[in-house]
Image: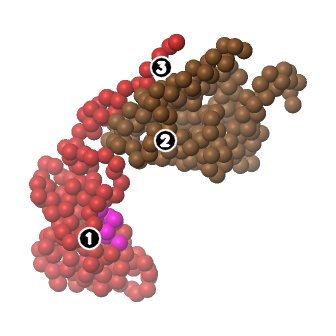
Chain colours: A brown, B red
């Protein structure tokens, strides 16, 4: 272990543990998933960075969205994201989740994924190299250190806007809201705790 | 190689246009009414695999072209037509896009016809369940038709969804 980080471990052990064990949900969408097998196997070996793919979203805290998102996939993405436990981090991989990419005028592809779920970081490129995933992971570590990877908090705070956008894209959703309307008290408590410290 | 098959098709059906595009590709253009008979003839001749049904939108002619691509699983069993791919084309009207299903001849035509019904709006008479296959949203015009304006649709639908405004404390 890096001795420089001992103080960080003592200050916030849970945060450091989260940071160095990013478990990625095995969710394949679009063409970018073809970059993930070399990343998690011997050539690039993502486990050096603590990133391993896990079987279910309930064990995961990193969500890589690896390519274009069709309307049908968006439904699965939202359901997967809402099943993950907090803290959870999302990374859009490739140019298609950012602004549609080469599918910018497609009739059935979501253009801006951050209208529907919060995104903590983007990897630009079509396709990004596997090294870009590691650059993103190290950037995500920095963001977690600075408490800037707060997508799940934004999701909770602005859930009614996200839900409205999801319903605009998908029509009536068949699952109940994740957070009851007017639950901003949850985040208020959290901020109060933060200010006391 | 496929000369005898070509002659047999030509002598059996009228109003038909058979071209050998290549050593192992043959194109048949036929009237819509004779398509099931031709498909049954070809199935009897050993072409037991319907690889694809697709459609082309010829909006200038106000017509759809349906393409049936046939091949055979067991190739090289006999001298006639080995490694041969047959494409059977027919034109149907674009306004009243109606055709008869070929599920009775090739059962695997079912998802292909559902797909064409969804993306081109072609009705297949006799199809047991023409229900949506891929699409989640409802479209006024089926989206693979040439007069479907994708950019207008994108600006009307997806660009109208607002970004999340994060209120700064």
Query: What's the distance in space between the residues labelled 1 and 3, CA to CA?
Result: 50 Å
Q: What's the chain of the residue with tag 1? A: B
Residue that badge 2 annotates: A78
Q: Residue at x 39, y 77 (%)?
A: B72
Q: Position of residue A70 (x, y in %)?
A: 41, 44
Location of residue A10 with respect to B60 vertically, above or below? above
The nearer-to-camera label among 1 and 3 is: 3
- Mark 3 surroundings: few (<14), some (14-19) or many (≥20) residues within 10 A: few
Q: Which secondary structure lies at badge 3?
A: loop
Q: Position of residue A47 (x, y in %)?
A: 75, 42
- Residue B110: within the magenta? yes
In the image, the segment drawn in magenta is B108-114
Q: What's the chain of the residue with tag 3? A: B
Dot 1 and dot 3 within a common chain: yes
Left-right relation of B63 to A159: left
Q: Residue at x 17, y 84 (%)?
A: B12
Q: How many marks?
A: 3
Q: What's the chain of the residue with tag 2? A: A
Residue that badge 3 annotates: B166
Instruction: Pick the quarter of the image with the N terminus of chain B.
Output: bottom left
Dot 3 and dot 2 within a common chain: no
Q: Position of residue A183 (x, y in %)?
A: 50, 27
Residue that badge 1 annotates: B128
- Mark 2 surroundings: few (<14), some (14-19) or many (≥20) residues within 10 A: some
The nearer-to-camera label among 2 and 1 is: 2
Q: Position of residue A155 (x, y in %)?
A: 52, 29
Q: Which secondary structure lies at badge 2?
A: helix
Query: What's the distance in space between the residues labelled 2 and 1, CA to CA?
Result: 33 Å
């Amino acid at each position: 272990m890096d001795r420089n980080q001992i103080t960080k471990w003592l200050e916030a052990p849970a945060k450091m543990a989260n940071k160095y064990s990013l478990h990625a949900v095995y969710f394949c969408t679009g063409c970018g998933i073809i970059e993930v097998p070399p990343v998690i196997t011997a050539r690039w070996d993502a486990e050096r960075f603590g990133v391993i793919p896990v079987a279910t979203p309930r064990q995961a805290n990193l969500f890589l969205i690896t390519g274009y998102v069709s309307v049908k996939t968006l439904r699965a993405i939202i359901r997967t994201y809402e099943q993950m436990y907090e803290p959870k981090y999302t990374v859009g991989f490739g140019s298609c989740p950012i602004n549609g990419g080469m599918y910018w005028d497609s009739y059935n592809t979501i253009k801006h994924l951050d209208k529907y779920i919060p995104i903590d970081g983007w990897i630009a490129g079509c396709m990004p190299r596997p090294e870009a995933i590691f650059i993103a992971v190290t950037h995500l570590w920095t963001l977690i250190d600075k408490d800037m990877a707060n997508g799940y908090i934004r999701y909770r705070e602005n859930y009614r806007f996200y839900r409205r956008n999801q319903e605009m894209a998908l029509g009536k959703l068949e699952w109940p809201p994740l957070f009851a309307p007017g639950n901003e008290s949850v985040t208020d408590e959290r901020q109060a705790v933060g200010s006391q410290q | 190689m496929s000369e005898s098959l070509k002659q047999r098709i030509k002598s059996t059906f009228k109003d038909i246009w058979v071209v050998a595009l290549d050593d192992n590709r043959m194109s048949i253009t036929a009237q819509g009414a004779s398509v099931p008979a031709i498909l049954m003839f070809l199935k009897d001749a050993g072409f037991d695999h319907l690889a694809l049904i697709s459609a082309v939108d010829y909006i200038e002619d106000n017509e759809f072209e349906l393409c049936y691509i046939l091949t055979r699983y067991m190739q090289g069993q006999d001298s006639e037509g080995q490694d041969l791919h047959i494409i059977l084309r027919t034109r149907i009207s674009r306004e009243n896009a109606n055709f008869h299903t070929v599920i009775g001849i090739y059962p695997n035509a079912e998802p292909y016809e559902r797909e064409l019904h969804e993306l081109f709006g072609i009705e297949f008479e006799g199809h047991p369940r023409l229900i949506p296959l891929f699409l989640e949203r409802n479209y006024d015009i089926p989206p693979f038709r040439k007069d479907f304006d994708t950019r207008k649709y994108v600006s009307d639908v997806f660009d109208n969804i607002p970004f999340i405004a994060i209120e700064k404390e």
